Image (tube, grey):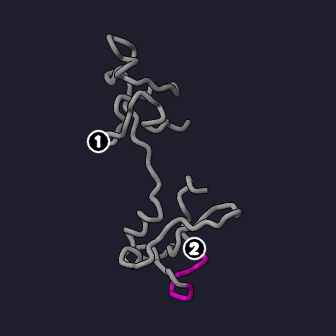
Amino acid sequence: MLRPGCKSYGWGSYCKGNGVCFGLLDMGDGGYCFEPTDGFNGGYCSDKVYSPVSCPVVDKTCEDLCAETPKCKNSKWGSYCKNYVGQPGPYKCFGLYHSDKPHLCYEPVEGDKCDESSPVYCPTEMD
């Protein structure tokens, strides 16, 4: 079962600096409760009984990946999710390709040295 995002549960939950959702607890049976309201005045929802929900992992954007790739970071073009009107995804991060080196390969102009058969796809939210 997928965990809810901090905000999607409602009542003002958010991702705290320690990596858990404020007030959002996993009841272990597939259910969740929100301690500030469900646990108010001795209610059933308590972090002494249930475990806090970890913040969801967020996919990096093409821009995030570019910032981690030296040639892209210092380029005048950068990267973005490249899609075409009327064409279905998956869409690709402009100029970014997978590589066997520590960083992604960046090729803003065709014909450089990246393996174009291994593009970096945009995060799933973009599909």
Picture quadrant of residue 43: top left
Relative height, residue 42 to residue 97 (above, below): above
- What amino acid is labelled 2 in the image? Ser
Q: Between residues 15 and 50, which one lies in front from this camera angle? A: 15
By secondary structure, the bulk of the magenta-drawn segment is best described as loop
Label 2: few (<14), some or many (≥20) within 10 Å? few
Q: Residue at x 50, y 73 (%)?
A: 96
Q: Magenta span has 116?
A: yes
Q: Residue at x 34, y 20 (%)?
A: 46
Q: Residue at x 46, y 60 (%)?
A: 61
Q: Are marks 1 and 2 in contact (CB under 8 Å)?
A: no
Relative height, residue 66 to residue 15 (above, below): below
Give the x, y percent position of residue 25.
40, 28
Q: Magenta span has 73?
A: no
Q: Is residue 14 left or right of residue 98?
A: left
> What mark, if any, has residue 18 been given in the picture?
1
- What amino acid is labelled 1 in the image? Asn
Quadrant assignment for the C terminus: bottom right
Relative height, residue 106 to residue 40 (above, below): below
Q: Secondary structure at mark 2?
A: loop
| Residue lying furthest bottom | 111
Give the x, y percent position of residue 111.
56, 88
Specify the segment rendered in magenta. Answer: 110-118
| Residue lying furthest left | 17
Q: Secondary structure at mark 1?
A: loop
Give the x, y percent position of residue 30.
52, 28
Q: What residue did someone put label 2 on?
A: 118
